Amino acid sequence: MIKNMLFSRAYPSYMIFFVTAKCNMKCQHCFYWQEINSLNPELDLGEIGKISHSLPNLFFLRITGGEPFLRGDLEEIVGCFYRNSSVRRVGISTNGSLNERTVKFANDIAGRFPGLQIEIGISIDHLYEKHDAIRCSPGAFKNAMGTYDNLLAVKKKYPNLTLGFLVTLMKDNQDSLEDIFKYLQEKKPDGIGLNIIRGKPKDAAQIEVDIGKYDKFRHLLNQYNFASPSKRSFMQRLRIAKTILSQDAIISMVKNNRAQLECLAGERIAVLYPDGNVCACELLGDRIGNIRDYGYDFKKLWKAESRKKITQNIRGNKCFCTHECFITADLIFSLKGMLKVFFKTLFNRHKKN
């Protein structure tokens, strides 16, 4: 973390990888909906292996889609980044629909790579039929909970597996957040994450959210996620501080409509799409280039003039958004951001959060 924070890099430290555009749902709040089930040829395992060799010392890999578990070679993809990029933390977001496939993956990866911290987050938007309606997929809620229950058995065997839920705040669930929380906490996940709807979703009305309800809900989640202070290590407390500062920034951005942090998109964090296109940010859509055109070498792509122009525009325009991954990168890969995290860890015990 210190190396990534203090020294400029010839490649990103944090990568969001859309491993597939294929998905078995049509969610109302999806900002990627126009690309879902695209016929563009996706990167194969051999190509991904080459890419992983060009990203030594990758700090964190976020795997998403589409639905990531629709890829039958997901174990091998993660293995490539573990061996070749030295990544030791991988987070996967899933709709939880592919029970057997997800459990097989968790068993395989957690057992094969004990040095890898693997985090699986199941997205839950509402309860029962209301969740199904948001996802436009009958039985989605029951399937997701079945997947979670089966993953619990895997977690008992492997301490490097972390299980949780992810709630995206949107118009259709903002008045039911306490009910959703009460249900999820009974399942005793390792954590419950919170996103706020972003981009241009399929159902544009979903962006009509009340930031006050976000604020109230995040305190409720933080009381659950950060319980038992006596059991916290210093690193755990750093993560708590980072989360709270990220949430504070989101609330300030929405209320004041201006940047709270200097965005490092295209500098310390990158987005790799299934067809090989690389962007600085998911929301801007400005393409740096296609990794195939650079011999699958991120170091070459990172030297491209297109990347430099994009990052200059981001900084010059003081670009900002509520995307949690990018806010995290802004906090942990800059000296100013990390100092905020460090001092909040030292002087704030997070009791009220």
Image: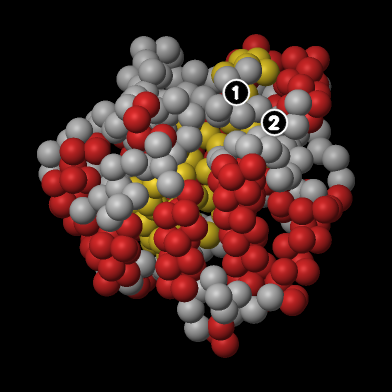
State the image coordinates of residue 168 (x, y, percent, origin top left).
39, 46
Count of picture labels = 2
Q: Is residue 186 left or right of residue 116?
A: left
Which element is circle 2 on? loop
- Residue shown at the point (81%, 26%) measured from the top left: 316
Residue under circle 1? 284
Mark 1 vs 2, N-terminal side: 1
Q: Please state, as top left, top right, bottom left or bottom right, where the N terminus lies in the image.
A: bottom right
Q: Is residue 240 left or right of residue 187?
A: right
State the image coordinates of residue 247 (x, y, percent, origin top left).
57, 55
Residue under circle 2? 319
Q: Please state, as top left, top right, bottom left or bottom right, where the C terminus lies in the image.
A: bottom right
Q: Is residue 331 left or right of residue 177?
A: right
Give the residue type that dot 2 points to. Cys
Chosen colour scheme: secondary structure
Depth order, front residue of 348/135:
348
Residue 74, picture quadrant: top left
Q: Residues within 10 Å of mark 2 (few under 14, many from 20)?
A: some
State the image coordinates of residue 337 (x, y, percent, origin top left).
77, 53
Which element is circle 1 on? loop
Q: Nearer the viewer, mark 1 or mark 2?
A: 2
Marks 1 & 2, CB-CB < 8 Å contact:
yes
State the image coordinates of residue 221 (x, y, percent, origin top left).
43, 65
